[in-house]
Each structure stands twice: as structure tokens, then as C-alpha cells.
Image (cartoon, helix red, strand yellow):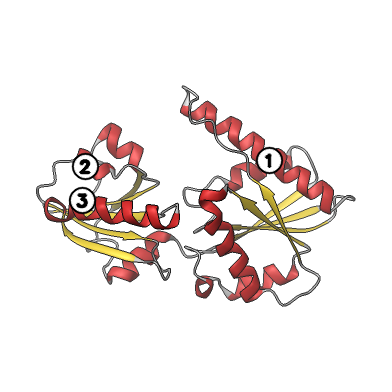
Amino acid sequence: MIELTLIGIGTGNPAHVTLQAIGAMNAADLILIPLKGADKSDLAGLRRAICATHITNPATKVVEFDLPVRDAANPSYRKGVDDWHDAIAEAWLAQITAQCPDLKGKVTLLVWGDPALYDSTLRIAARLEQRIALTTKVIPGITAIQALCAAHAIPLNDIGAPFVITTGRQIRDHGWPAAADTVVVILDGECSFQSLDPQGISIWWGGCVAMPEEVLVAGPLAEVGDQILSTRAALRATHGWVMDIYLMRRSR
């Protein structure tokens, strides 16, 4: 039986890794680190740094593997994602089989943010459960949403009011969600706030939140939108990647 543990590691700051997560890392026989290509090598580097900071058990083996690439040209977004997840499950299986040939042991993956929020690691694990004897455990992590609000020292919600967590794609395709005046936007590589009428909207944006490279911008969307675009582009040019997130609040 493989005991698979998915550990939320927040935004990559080693200080955000919980004591529960550190215990699980040191109890693991194998920690798998995905490689996403040269332009995102810093992401693997952050995982390596977390392992170097917190792992004290010499028996814990850390193994890197190449992560399959999603076919962005697939005309069906959902089919492309499903095929990609299938390929990732196969990559996991190949590594587990190679490192744990008797298919017994404790295997761990470090997941950005929290595995339960806009992350597909649990869905990939479910695919693996159909192939081998596997149990899955989740250790929660600090989300980018929490880190963003902390960085700007703002509350996530107004008093007694709901908020919506959504993606850039949803903002582009459907506009402002009708259910709330506060919207948190993640997974947005195109700064989709540009598709909205900025009047009456305030924005709190963060790039590389909680990391040494962190940059924050806040203010009326009509005034700071262009600044966010240029700041994001500069971060991406410098690091080859950028993880960003933003909260928008609409005046009633």
C-alpha cells in the first residue's frame, strides 16, 4: 500500500510550512518534485529550498521528475486538462514504481497553496487510486488568498457579506460575478480585470506574495491598472514566471 500525502506549502515561503507538514515530510520515504521546464526552474528551486530547510531525516529521499506539458492547442479546454492529468498520473506512477518497487511506502508531494483550492493534485491522485493500492492524506497549507490579504492588511470580506473566488477565464467570459461585491481572482495570466469597467472598483494586487520578490499594488482600478500590467510584466521578465493574485471590491 502506498500512503500518498499531499502537503500544502503556501506560496513557497519556507516559513509558511506548518509543523504538521514538517512532520509529514520527515516521515516520508519519498518526496517527488516536478520539473516544469527551464523557464520555471525557480519553482522546483523553491521546493528544494523547503526540503533543505525542513527535512532532517536522512532516510527521506527527494526525487525530481519531468512534468508532462498540457496541450494548450487542444480546442477543448476540459479535454486538454483531462488528458494532461492522465499523463501526470502516469508520470507519478512511473516514479513510484521505480522508487518503491514493492508498491509500499510513504510518498509525498508538495502542493502550492492548499490542495483543496483550485488545484488538481487530488484529482490526479484519484486517477492513481484506480491503478494501485493507495490511500491519500491532505495536509492544508496557507493559500495565496490568505497571504494576499495579510500582505495588504485588509479583511477578505465586508461585514456579513459574501465573496466570490473565481478565475481570470470566468471574469473574461462572464464579467463581474453577480453574487458578491468582493471578488478574488486567481489563475489569471492575462490580467482579466482589463475586461471590466473600472469605475467604482478598488483592487489589491500581489505578485510573488510572501516571497522576497513580493510586489504589491493597490488603489482604484482606473488609476493603478496600467501599473499592475507593467509590474507583472517586469516580474515575469526577471524570473521567467510570476504567480499573482488580486482582490477587487466594488462600491455599492
The first of marks 2 and 1 along the sequence is 1
Label 3 or label 2, whichever lies nearer to me, is: 2
Residue 205 x %, y %: 28, 58
Residue 177 x %, y %: 26, 41
Structural distance between the alpha carbons of marks 2 and 1: 36 Å
In the image, 199 versus 131, the foreground residue is 199
Q: Which mark is residue 141?
A: none
Is residue 157 in sight in this rendering? yes
- Kindly identify which residue carries mark 3: 181
Residue 49 x %, y %: 59, 69
- Kindly identify which residue carries mark 1: 89
Callout 2 amino acid: Gln
- Up-down: is 111 above or below 123? below
Name the residue at the right extreme. 102
- Kindly identify which residue carries mark 2: 194
Q: Are marks 3 and 2 in contact (CB under 8 Å)?
A: no
Residue at 32% over, 65% down: 215
Q: Are marks 3 and 1 in contact (CB under 8 Å)?
A: no
Residue 153: image quadrant is bottom left
